[in-house]
Amino acid sequence: NDHEAIVDILSSFIRRDGRKAGQHMISDSNRRRSDDNAVGEELFFQKIEALTWKATDPNTHFMEHLGTYISVICNAAATHHVMMNSAFISAALAVKVQEGIALALDPNLEMWKIATPIIVESERRKKGLIKSATHILGYDKWVRDLMRKDTNSAISEGRVTRMPTTTSNQK
């Protein structure tokens, strides 16, 4: 559904995970367009990831360049046949307008401090608190990597052996 796709995309951007945002954008596009799937997905991911890192540069004022970033995203989408979700564009433009009004009222306002909890709350409702918190903090990936390293290390050191696989008709 569009709401879930937008939350996934925006929360990935907030977490500065451009690759994940690009994956969500392609997944959403392919879900809505079965006749013309994305092309050059890896290059699309790289473009979105590079944009994310540029936008998080402390010397760059993200909101001052939001229109440029949207343009870069749309150009990358057109090049790689990623159908942009109109709700994403609407949300991005709405954020820009709201941010402009808020900054006119208080030039020292840090919009991300307000937006992040709202996105996190939406994720919590969607995925559940524990799953969302572990994902946001990166613990899920950390635990997976740790388990993989520990298992591989134990196997290579001979502390454990791989369990033989069995088929359902073996007893």
Image (spheres, helix red, strand yellow):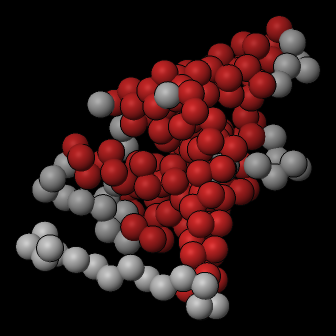
x and y, in percent, of residue 24 in the image: 42, 48
x and y, in percent, of residue 88 in the image: 45, 33
> Can residue 114 be seen?
yes
Quadrant that contains the N terminus = top left
Residue 10 lies, with reference to residue 69, above or below; the image says: above
> Can residue 75 be seen?
no
| Total marks placed | 0
Residue extending farthest left:
169
Q: Residue at x 32, y 82 (%)?
A: 164
Q: Residue at x 46, y 31 (%)?
A: 127
x and y, in percent, of residue 45 in the image: 50, 63
Residue extending farthest top:
105
Quadrant that contains the C terminus = bottom left
In the foreground, 58 or 144: 144
Q: Residue at x 30, y 61 (%)?
A: 38
In the foreground, 13 or 135: 135
Residue 113 lies, with reference to residue 37, above or below; the image says: above
Left or right of 26? Residue 165 is left
Left or right of 109? Residue 102 is left
In the foreground, 55 or 17: 17
In the picture, residue 158 is in which quadrant? Answer: bottom right
x and y, in percent, of residue 87 in the image: 40, 29
Q: Residue at x 73, y 56 (%)?
A: 54
Left or right of 150? Residue 21 is left
